[in-house]
Image (spheres, grey):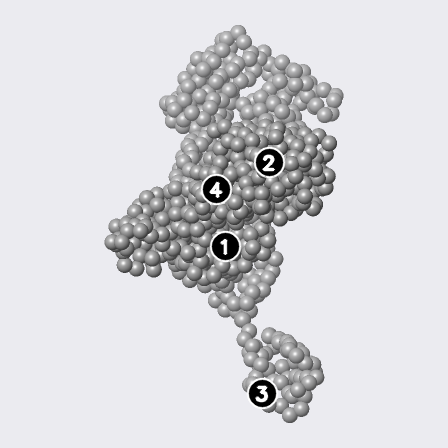
Amino acid sequence: MNWKNLKKLVTLIAVIYCFIPENLFSQDITAPGADYAVVTLYEEEQPLGSGNWVPMPPNEQDSVFVFCADNANAGTLVAPGSGCTYEWLIYDNINLQYVAYATTQTITGLASGGYKVVVTCGAAKACYYAWVFVNQTNASLGNITAGCSAFQLSGAFDKVSDFTVFSPPDDPFTIDANTEIEVCFTATHTYVSDLGFYLVAPGFGAGCSPNPAVPGQPGIVELLPAVSSWTDVTNIPSSVLSCDPSDIDFVCNGGNDLNNFCFTTAEPFGNPIYTACVCDLPVPLTGIYASAGPWSTINNQQVPAAVGTAANCGWSVQIYDCEDIDDGYFTNATIKFTGSGVCGPATHFYDSGTISSYISDGSCDAVSASRYVIPPASPYQYTVANNISSAVLSCSGTWNPAWGTTDFLANSSPRNINPPPTVDTWFILTVTDNFGCVRIDSSLFVTNPVNATITAAGPFCENTGDQQLTAATPGGTWYGLAPNTNCVSSTGLFHTNLGPGTYCVVYSIGGVCPGADTLCIVVKPELTVTNIIDSCGPGGVYVSFNISGGNPSDFIVTGGSGTVYPTGEFISNVIAGQSDWTFIVDNPVVGCGSVTVNGSEHCDCTTSAGTLSSTTLAVMCESECITSTVTNFQQDVDHNDTLVYYLHQGANNQIVNAVDSNLTGTFCFDSLKMMQYNTYYYISAVAANRITVPSLWIDLTDTCMNVSQSTPVMWLQNPTASAGSDTSVCGKTINLNATNPSSGNGHWATSSCVQFFSNSLIINPEVVAINYGDCIFEWIVENSYGTKVCSSNDFVTVHFLPSPTSYAGEDIPNVCGKTTDLAAVLDIPGLSTGQWSGTGTFSDASSETSTITVSSF
């Protein structure tokens, strides 16, 4: 029996005039702040060691107090009574006993576990038990980044853990003369008269402290020394046995095995009427007998062993095998102690279970003999299951069905919050478990205005290629402000080839909370040199050219002396005694790099390439050709010179990287010759000695070769416009969908058939038609440089159709038979069509008037 049960059991000290607080023993432990309480489901083994577990009666059950909390130490218990002393203990499920915890009436900060309190009020004591379950069900929602975009709402929940309840053990006690003890052995062994049986207290036995102890000394009970070696192993007179004296010190029983061979304090020790004479007993040895030696050798020992006792030094039994001619195995042992604990009668049962421990053969002393520590029998335990019963998503506004189900228990995958809320919104996860504990976590979505700030850019030098602009938040659209709307592409490529000046660009982001920013970018002028002339004069060569790209007063020319005039014209001083010349032109104030101008003039040569018809930049579309020819040509007197036109990449009278040459001065863009768009090329007329190699035309090493001033030329790629495929839409609203151009900038032309055009500069603007019907939209893509524009366009037709409404006719409440006529109405005859569906067979499912036949009533 589990004597713990009478938790209100009172031990009264025999004092006639003692005061017991009124109703103390009708009270119980309380738990302020507990959210729920359930009754335990203790069971007990009847009889002990049988494996038969039965529920304990209701008055022996306790309370499990459930605290719903995030803190693992959230429990609080209050002992009954007032003005008493209190000894709280906490259950140690490793050592299977209660250990000291606190001495106040109220204990707080409790973790999950079993608790016991001994309440002493004057001469009265009472013991109470309770369990604390700190239910840490977890609920968490991920943080949401503030903004205006769709986002993933992620969360998690977990029951954290179940809770295990143990049937509480009885109180520990100290063995005295009133303690009831029973020790039983089961073993397989030959020659049972060779065996001796002993009970060893905790801390005793070989290898234990305070001392190993030997039979006859404190700590060991000589239950039955071996008959075959009696006088060698004990000082107990053999007269305590009922054996014939001739059997003593003799192998008197060659039988085998013992089964529940037990010794008890219920029979007087050393009394031959009750002790076992194995010489005369049948085998296997069985039954309950008195101990040969006194039990008092283990008085004052604690049951169970104190916490901290070494694992190999708890309550144990020992079997001596005093002959070396046999062998066997120890298969089971039990020990039962019944005594008086602080709360009343207490029983502790030890059970080795089924084992197979070798009995050392010929080991007949306390050091070498087999000793087995018997563990306390496992207490009854069960799990208080903790399950999640619901997990629900919600928000401070109205949950949009497009976000998915709010049942997070059935589907815990992240929710795609698209479209996002248009106002600041709390998202909430509410998790409830089977105890009713509720955990809530929330995360705030803040609709901060989108940060459309453009990253600082510029100034840029003219003609340095497209520069990619960026903004704090990607995904928006770029466009330029008038009059330079084409200075930037919709993807943010800023064009530096539109000439010097200040260009303002706008970056715009739509959506839930739109934003925009404007940045004005300075394009600094490119330093250019034109109209280069070298001529012979008194004393040598004179060079002149025109400089543009800034203030003439800032121009610096090095490499030779000369003068820069306010008009930007440079005229050199005489260059004597040389035919090759080089000048470096710079404008350090603008800082867009220098230009090297070089040439060669032989003043004894009369050859001249003349002057080209144009020396200003010509910008051409990809499919266009350019012709630039000389207006005059003076041929050398030896009549060996000829004139050839070159397309090349060397500015300032230098033939560099020749791309093409001919006698006509007409050149076209040719990608097969590795020509590039938006790249400077130059057309030059070259006069020099003719040669017979057709692909070369002239001798480029002729010292009298003369190169004319060049005509700069640039080709722009012809853009491709794609307005998308013709389409139909129900209603008057649609988003157009052009293809983003690979070069140039696109825009939609205005249309007289729409009443709203959200943004003509983006590829997918929203438009709203004035009327139903067909509407044609034009998508124009332009690639430009300066005033030159290369363009392409495409058209898309959108059929705006009125949304039909369905009317299947009046309900037909009753039909005689299985066939009836149906009559639907089309709201737009000639344009809309309908289709019947349902259970049955239709004569014409696509006709407004149809007959339906069903198979059964």
Q: Residues within 10 Å of mark 2 (few under 14, many from 20)?
A: many
The residue carrying mark 2 is 238
Find the distance from the CA under tag 2 to the CA under tag 1.
Answer: 37 Å
One can see residue 44 in this view: yes
Which numbered mark, 2 or 1, is in the foreground of this view? 2
Q: Nearer the viewer, residue 1 or 130?
A: 1
Find the distance from the CA under tag 4 to the CA under tag 2.
Answer: 33 Å
**Residue sitting at x 42%, y 48%:** 340
Query: Residue 581: x percent and y percent?
Result: 53, 14
The residue carrying mark 1 is 1
Dot 4 or dot 2: first in sequence order is 2
The residue carrying mark 4 is 304
Q: Residues within 10 Å of mark 1 (few under 14, many from 20)?
A: some
Is disc 1 placed on a helix, strand or loop? loop
Find the distance from the CA under tag 1 to the CA under tag 3.
Answer: 78 Å
Q: Amino acid at mark 2?
A: Ser
Which numbered mark, 4 or 2, is in the foreground of this view? 2
Tell me the quarter of the image containing the C terminus: bottom right
Q: Amino acid at mark 1?
A: Met
Q: Which mark is residue 275?
A: none
Q: Amino acid at mark 3?
A: Ile
**Residue sitting at x 51%, y 20%:** 596
Which numbered mark, 3 or 4, is in the foreground of this view? 4
Dot 3 or dot 4: first in sequence order is 4
Is disc 3 placed on a helix, strand or loop? loop
Q: Which mark is residue 812?
A: 3
Find the distance from the CA under tag 3 to the CA under tag 4.
Answer: 86 Å
